Amino acid sequence: MSEADLSVPFNRRAASAMKDAHLQEALTIATTKFIGLRREAFGDFPEGERLRDLAREIKEATLQRLDGYLEQLIDNVERLGGRVHYAATAAEARGAVLDIARRTGARMAVKSKSMATEEIHLNEALEAAGVTAVETDLGEYIIQLAHERPSHIIAPAIHKTKGQVADLFAKELRRPVAADPEALTRIARGELREKFLHADLGITGANFAIADTGTVVLVSNEGNARMVTSLPRVHVAVMGVEKVVPSMTDLMVFLQILAKSATGQKLSVYTTLVRGPRRTGELEGPDEFHLVLLDNGRIRQLAGTLRESLYCLRCGACLNVCPVYRQIGGHAYGYTYPGPIGILLTAMLDGPSAVKDLAHASSLCGACVDACPVRIDIPRMLVELRRELDEKRLAPWTERLAYGLLARVLSNPRLYRWAKPVARLVQRPFARDGAIRSAPLLGEWTRTRDLPAVASVTFQERWKDLEREAQ
Amino acid sequence: MTTRVEFLSRIRGEMAKTRGLFPARTAPRPADPRGVAEMLKRELAERWPAAVERFQREFERVGGVFYRVRALADVPQVVAGIAREREVRRLVAWDARELGGDLLAALEARGLDPVAMPPGEVPAEERTRLRRLVADAALGLTGVDLAIAETGTLVVRSGAGRPRSTSLLPPVHIAVFDRTALIESLGQAGVFLEAWQGEESSGTGAVVSFITGPSRTADIELTLTRGVHGPKEVHAVFVEAPIRG
């Protein structure tokens, strides 16, 4: 399945993903592997649990003084010769980057992996302004050639086979290419190396930004973030406001759990701490450094129901353990951020109505909370969202009527007693062995599951009998 | 476009509506990071043999190649061996003062073609030329500011005479260090990062890089492949005798 089409309803997108045999296999292999690697990494690391609690506390403490930490970050970046831009919306963020590109006469931009720039659809805007945007993370490069979007936060191309990647490369390079990961990686290295050396603009996100020092921190395995921040003459970092952390000491707490949660590594290969433009005496580094601070729905959530999702480190651990993500993959969600946390982030960016179906794409099993390095209570917020959506009356009237009646009956003992014999009578033609497998009007429900029938003797009735026997 | 004042006042407006989810504090920072760093160095001067063993284990686990030599003068031989095996000669190195010793003559004598990076500011055209030269080199020779045993990580600070590209563009990176760079944990690294803030001099660069093994990716069918953008090989040479005497 390629780009998700939002005009197709979510259940149809999910159904077609589940029929895609190749996607199913890729998802099972990838998520199972990630789960194992994460478990091993924390198994060898007894301090892990305490550090997760500490990391969670740092995130909350930072949000409680967010204005102060951001001001400190801004002052430090400016003191180091960088410039800070303030973007309330995705359009403002795109505008800021395009202005920089135009003013510096940039023709080509190299990008390292960044969900924030995916979120604001920066590549399309750059291309429309005549700036070639090149994704340099191998997975992102692959999906850029395929004109798709990432299907996993940290493994954007897990849905592609090596054969499909070879075909994409062959088409791009107009020559035959072997379907071998080693050979394909070598080709990408050669192609992208030239781009790094010739690009005018380097665009990154930020895993963290340190208020105390004005440092932007980038975590990668391939080394592209180092290239992007060192070789082009201008560096632009786009970051959500919630990424700020107070100090280097805080940063170390996060670094000790981030890679373990994401890929099971003790530390990713490269952690790059960047402070502003090139300094005197340095051979490389940009002449200009820009930091774009992005709101795009985040700030409103400081006091909103989704506040806790502002703790998210974008590690992808909750995707791997989610029984829904494991079945449908990232594209079926239809938005930039997939998986359980993705539902919350989508609601944050695009408003609750965007997730009227997605909010129900969770069994609320809580596997995501256990996997999350900062223990974000995703199920709690999903339930809140469902409640909000109910209040907005977005569900179909039939569904609202059914649940409304049910709520009445269940909360009123007299009504409940009266309803039991009626229900037994109505269900008689359909109930078999305590379950209704199909019935008129219930098609949507019974297509994928049974509806429990009202018991022939209910618990209350049985209890009464027992009391009578005891006397 | 939103201004700084508008942006921050929106944040304050939202913050005022809530007290947050629970009482919380940030991580406790050392009051005197430089003092703590000094103390750590003194303690580690006793514990380095265990640290170097752990470093080796972790560094090899992430795909690094570890060597142990007696003195800095033994390093050229190791480097020449790596070059010979790969049939390459072009090497770029940090400036001698940054490396802790001049190895160029010894490297040349062993058949290599080494170039040292300038110790200070050079004009823009020269920077372009040198960058091309680094990009074409087969080997990059650097020092190390911290070697973290817990993770097998090399920490290098950029600056005059120590370009970022020497540990990035050549396919083989060789890093030389001694016990003074060895620390045990990421937590300790945090103390040094805090301590470095106060002691920036004119030659200090803008970047600190943590390097944990060779560049890698698993983006195609989760097959681990090395050397996607950064070096395909990372070699760490531990020098037993302190490099700076």
Image (tube, coloured by chain):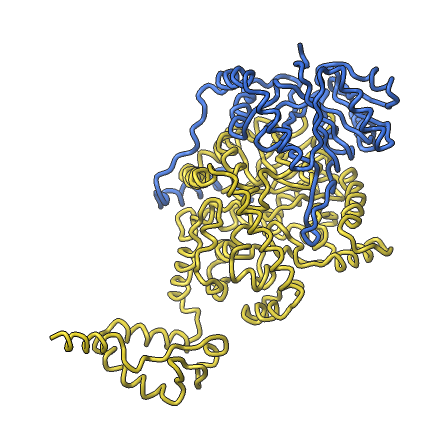
Image location of residue A433, percent across then percent down: 39, 82
Relative to B27, say whether A309 is above or below.
below
For the colour blue, the matching chain is B
Could you tell me which quadrant the C terminus of chain A lies in?
bottom left
Image location of residue B111, percent across then percent down: 88, 22
Q: Residue at x 67, y 34 (%)?
A: B60
State left or right for residue A362 relative to residue A31.
left
Image location of residue A154, percent across then percent down: 61, 49
Whether residue A66 is visible, yes or no, is no
- The image quarter containing residue A87 is top right
- The residue nearer to you, when weighing A192 against A222, is A222
- The image quarter containing residue A157 is bottom right
Relative to B165, say whether A305 is above or below.
below
Q: Residue at x 69, y 33 (%)?
A: B64
- The residue nearer to you, when weighing B191 against A3, is B191
State left or right for residue B234 relative to residue A16.
right
Q: Residue at x 83, y 16 (%)?
A: B106
Q: Residue at x 31, y 72 (%)?
A: A407
Q: Residue furthest left?
A: A471
For the colour yellow, the matching chain is A
State left or right for residue A302 relative to residue A261.
left
Q: Residue furthest bottom?
A: A429
